Structure formats: structure tokens, C-alpha cells
Amino acid sequence: MIYKIIITSVILIVSFCCNAGENLIFNGFATLGMEYTDPATEIGNTNRDSNFSFSDLTRLGLQTTWLATDKLSFTGQIITKGRKDFDVDLSWAFAKYNFNKYYSIRIGRQQIPIYILADFQHVGYTYPWPQPPREVYWQLPFSDFDAISNIVNLNFGEWDLTTQIAYGKTESEAGTINGKHELDLSAYGINAELTNRKLRLGASYFKSSLSTDLTGIYRNQAELLIASEPLAGIYLNQISQDTIDGWFKVDNADCSFKSIGATYDNNNLLIIGEFTQRRVEELYPDTDGWYFTLGYRFNNIMPYLSFGKIHTKNYENKHLHADGLIEETVINYITSEMERVLIVNQKETAIGVRYDVTEYAAVKAQYKKVDTYGQIGTFGNIPASNTIDYFTLAIDLVY
């Protein structure tokens, strides 16, 4: 926490006090949002118990870039979000060196380039919805990592090709209704984008190793088991802590993430779509997610339709196994309960409208029907109903 405060302070001091003239670029973005769900449903571990939320979408970001030379630049970005109790996060803090117009390197904290909207996913003004579709953008509980990236830019007439090869590490926090657990992850991979004036095509592939400790989830489920089955306490006392650790501690599990996406925008018609795959070796479920959005601009008003789905694959092959009858009895109960919070199946249909008030401000309204098939979906707890009515209103600003 201390290093975040120090770096954040340096960024702000440089922003406001450095006499850098045209070499200093300062900008920012903000979203003010309101959500309503029926029935009342927790969104992304915001711990709310009412239908309304004014914090989940609300955020403020500040960004500074200092052009130290014609080849060297430094960029920092801080974000505060309502869903994180408005704690300040350092999302960007990197140095970039341009060797020539074709090749550059970037070192430091940066966005992991796995989505087609990766660099702009916090900047609501850059996309049509109040927030990116959760069926895709929910799948990873982090968006930045401390990394080194090699970036190549090539031009082919009207087309530009950008490739980015990156390696980095991150520590993040994931949460379920049974509590939060820390994730320690190292990742490497490649992202490629091909663009012209109207069309943008993107694809990425990243491999990683994941370490985490799910024994906290186990302990919560064990307490529920003891409460419902008094004899379970006797069974649990016969299982060693080493055995439990072996079940629920994940050490350097192999993971992969693939994505493809496209956007088409001719200033009237807007089409956006992405497809993603998450694969994890250990207890976490494999997921496939996609969305497709179609919009059309009428001057400064754009109505749109959007569809999305995420579903779990191959989880039946990841069940834990035990040797003894006691262990098997306990683990069957606990893993069946864990399925309720780890398996993710959800689809949504959304209709919305964006109104561009000025070139720096937009107002958005969206209604969507979400079906979680009786499971947790991308929410913070299991909804009281299989289907949720979800209304969102947001104001996006850039400056």
C-alpha cells in the first residue's frame, strides 16, 4: 500500500508541478453510474443488500504522460472505483522507449493485452454500454500486470498491424460468497491487432501459472457441513491438515486464455464482438464466453442490441478424489457446495441507448435480462431468481 501512495504522489506532483510545457500530457476520465436489479443481487462482491447501487460503476481516473525525449516517455494512471470502496489503484506506471517507428518496448505496470478493449476498458466513454459485457470481461479478476512488452508496428497501405509480446506478474484478489482468496500469477503471451479506418481485428493467446489457496472456502463449507450434519465434525477431525492443504492449495497450475474480437464502425453502423476461452489445470472451472453488439447512430443518439453468454466446460473432470470412505464422504459434500460458487453459466439480452451530449460527455441507459440457470453466474451471490432484470444508467466523461 505504501508504494502505491508514493508512486501516486509522484505522478500527481509531476502532473501539477513539473514545468514540462508541451512535453507533459494530462487527461482523465470518470463514470457516474446507477444500477437496479430485481431481485436485489450483489454485483461483483459489492456486499449490497438492496435493489439499487450507486457505487459499482462509479469511478475516476487520472493519467499523465511525460515525453522525456523524442524516444523516451513515462506514463502513469491511477483509478479509484466505488466497487473497491474508492481505494486508489495504480493501474499504469510504465516507461516506453521507441527505438524507431516500428519497434518499442514498454516496462512497468500496464494493461494485460487480452481483450480488444483492454487499454480502454475503464474508460466508459470509449464504448457504447455502461460497462463491457461481463460474459467476457469478468473471466479474469485482474486487468493489469507488472511486465515487459515488445511492440512492433507495421503499415501495409491502409492497414496497420500491431503485435505485442509480453511477460509479467500480478497479484490479485478473487471473491465468492464464501470469502476472498489471493491469486499469484505469472503470464506470457502475444496479442495482434489489424486495423484500418473502419475495421479492427484482434486476437491474443496467453499462458500462465497460477498459485492460490482455497482452504478458506473449504473451512466455510466445513462449518456448514457441521451445522447440518453433527457427525461431520467427527469425520472432519480425522482428516489431517496436510490432506486438506493437498486438496485446496493450488501451486503453479497451468492456465491459458485465448481471445478473438472485431469492431466495425463507419460512423453510423457499429458492430462489436468477442469470443474468449479460459482454461485452468486445477480446481477452477474452464469457461467460454462471448458477446455480440449491434448499434446504429442517428446523429448523436445510438440505440443498440447486445447478446452474451458464458458457460463452464469440463468441470466434471476436476472433482477432487480421496482414498478413504470418511475423506470421500466429506469431499463429496464440500465439492458439491463449491460447484454452486465456482460453476458459471449465464446468458443475457440487452437493449440500450447512448446519447453524446458533447464530444467529452455521454449519457447511457441499458436494460438487460440475465439468466443464471439457478447458479451464481457473474454475480457476487446466487440470485434469488434464475432471471434478473438489470437496469443501468451512466454518465461518462473524458477530459
Image (cartoon, rainbow, N blue to C red):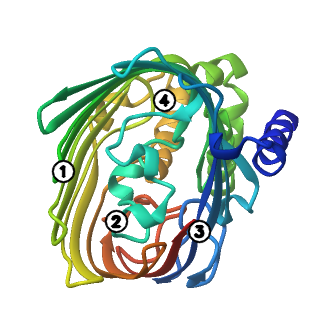
Residue at 67% of width from left, 66% of height from top? 82
Cα separation, mark 3 vs mark 2, equals 20 Å
CB within 8 Å, label 4 to label 1:
no
- Of callouts 3 and 4, the N-terminal one: 3
Does residue 63 appear left or right of residue 317 in this picture? Answer: right
Does residue 76 appear left or right of residue 118 in this picture? Answer: right
Q: Which residue is mark 2?
A: 372
Cα separation, mark 3 vs mark 4, equals 40 Å
- Of callouts 2 and 1, the N-terminal one: 1
Cα separation, mark 2 vs mark 1, equals 38 Å
The secondary element bearing badge 2 is classed as loop
Nearest-to-viewer mark from 3 and 1 = 1
Q: Which residue is mark 1?
A: 197
Query: Label 4 is placed on what type of residue?
Result: Glu
Quarter occupied by residue 166: top left
Q: Which residue is mark 4?
A: 328
- Of callouts 3 and 1, the N-terminal one: 3
User: Badge 4 local density, few (<14 within 10 Å), some, or many (20+)?
Assistant: some
Quarter occupied by residue 355: bottom left
